[in-house]
Image (cartoon, grey):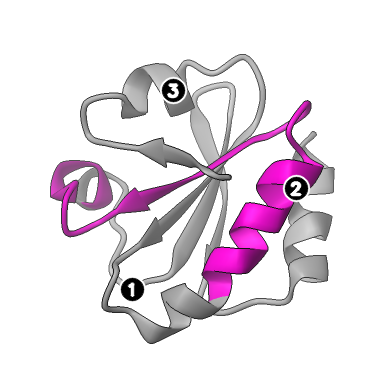
Amino acid sequence: MAFQFTDANFKQEAIEADKPVLVDFYADWCGPCKIMAPVIDELAKEYNEVVKIGKLNVDDNPDTARQYRVMSIPTMIIYKNGEAVETIVGVVAKNALKEKLDAHK
């Protein structure tokens, strides 16, 4: 299961993480987000040891979404060493996300 990021834990759990982090910015009402949800959960299991993968509900946590200028959802951002290093917007194939993650491991 993917980790649940919030405004309160984002700095500690994503920015200060000791490994790369993929954050899926989503909303419960978003159709494309629902399509990506099982992909994110599968990747969270597959990359458990090397990449922290989780979700942030933009409706419940607007401050973080605003800070990282998330304008469309789903938006997936990969963070490494405290910096956003890759942004992926929209529905993408699992293999495409794996390629992005592998490039930042």
Mark 3 sits on what residue? 13
Q: CA distance from mark 1 to mark 2?
A: 21 Å
Mark 3 residue type: Glu
Q: Nearer the viewer, residue 59 or 11?
A: 59
Please say if the residues under marks 1 and 3 sit with CB atoms less than 8 Å apart: no
Q: Nearer the viewer, mark 2 or mark 3?
A: 3
> Is residue 5 found left or right of 85 in the rendered image?
left
Q: Residues within 10 Å of mark 3 (few under 14, many from 20)?
A: some
Q: CA distance from mark 1 to mark 3?
A: 23 Å
Q: What is the quadrant of the N terminus in the image?
A: top right
Mark 2 sits on what residue? 101
Q: Residue at x 46, y 76 (%)?
A: 34
Is 71 inside the magenta-drawn segment?
Answer: no
User: Could you tell me residue 88's position as x and y percent?
Assistant: 56, 65
Picture quadrant where residue 67 is located: top left
Q: Nearer the viewer, residue 6 or 2?
A: 2
Secondary structure, mark 2, is: helix
Q: Residue at x 29, y 67 (%)?
A: 27
Q: Residues within 10 Å of mark 1 (few under 14, many from 20)?
A: few
Q: Nearer the viewer, mark 1 or mark 3?
A: 3
Q: Residue at x 39, y 85 (%)?
A: 31
Q: Residues within 10 Å of mark 2 (few under 14, many from 20)?
A: some
Mark 1 sits on what residue? 72
N-term mark: 2 or 3: 3
Secondary structure, mark 1, is: loop
The number of discs equals 3
Magenta residue span: 36-65
Mark 1 residue type: Ser
